[in-house]
Image (tube, rainbow, N blue to C red):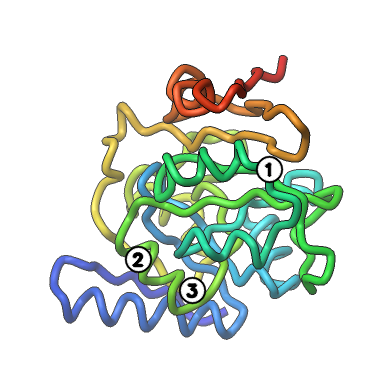
Amino acid sequence: MTSMERHGTSTPDERERALDAASLAVQRGGLVVLPTDTVYGIGADAFDPAAVRALLAAKGRGRDMPPPVLVSAATTLDALAVRVPGYARALVEAFWPGPLTIVCHQQTSLQWDLGDTRGTVAVRMPDHEVARELLERTGPLAVSSANLTGRPAATDADAAEEMLGEHVDVIVDAGPSPQGADGAQPSTIVDVTGPQGRVLRVGALSLDQLNAVLEPLGATLTVED
């Protein structure tokens, strides 16, 4: 691997250099650290199996913990997933971009290998301009929180570099996570592969917030034990 680059985003020129460097690294099969609206993430081209394997290895994860996929637009959901129920679309309309990850049936025609997904894909559209600008250039990225497994997720570029700097090609530094180190929470994950949605992880969105959207539709979510 080439030496790691770190780019700030505080000026338009810096931001452009950061996005250029990160998108080039992704195209070359490398790993990048990027900011999101929750915590910093480590990302790879979702359609490059070797890059996804490198991402899992960098975090110390196995194939049994496949990474979610970040997208720049809600319309991309139908390119990645099938049989998305109406209640899931209502959640997407209410909470994208934002800290909601939905687990869907994946398109069977997709040529990718995210790990042992059992025919599903977890998708999120982050509420962070720099992240979405990068995603517009790269297409869908497999992104997991920027930390070693078992350690707290990075809420700034320094923490991400300390844990993962030797594994990544580019770090995009957009300052501290918007929620702040103390309040930073991961996204809420909802499994929408069944007739009733199940909350797999309560994060930045509460069960009450989610159900407030669904109750007028006659739907509610349950929380997995």
Identify which amino acid the numbered label 2 is placed on. Answer: Val
Q: Mark 1, mark 2: which one is toward the viewer?
A: 1
Q: Which image quadrant for residue 170? A: bottom left
Is residue 149 shown above or below 165? Answer: above
Image marks 3 and 1: residues in contact by CB distance under 8 Å: no
Q: Residue at x 52, y 46 (%)?
A: 147
Q: Quadrant of the N terminus?
A: bottom right
Q: Position of residue 178 (x, y in %)?
A: 26, 43
Most foreground residue, 188 or 149: 188
Report helix, strand or loop for mark 3.
loop
Marks 1/2: CA–CA distance: 35 Å
Q: Residue at x 57, y 75 (%)?
A: 30
Report helix, strand or loop for mark 2.
strand
Most foreground residue, 134 or 22: 134
Badge 3 density bin: few <14, some 14–19, many ≥20, Cα 10 Å: many
Q: Mark 3, mark 1: which one is toward the viewer?
A: 1
Which one is earlier in the sequence, the residue at label 1 or at label 2?
A: 1
Q: Quadrant of the C terminus?
A: top right
Q: Which mark is residue 169?
A: 3
Residue placed under numbered mark 2 in the picture: 172
Marks 2/3: CA–CA distance: 10 Å
Q: Position of residue 106 (x, y in %)?
A: 76, 57
Q: Residue at x 53, y 58 (%)?
A: 70
134 left or right of 57? left
Q: Which image quadrant for residue 47? A: bottom right
Residue placed under numbered mark 1 in the picture: 85
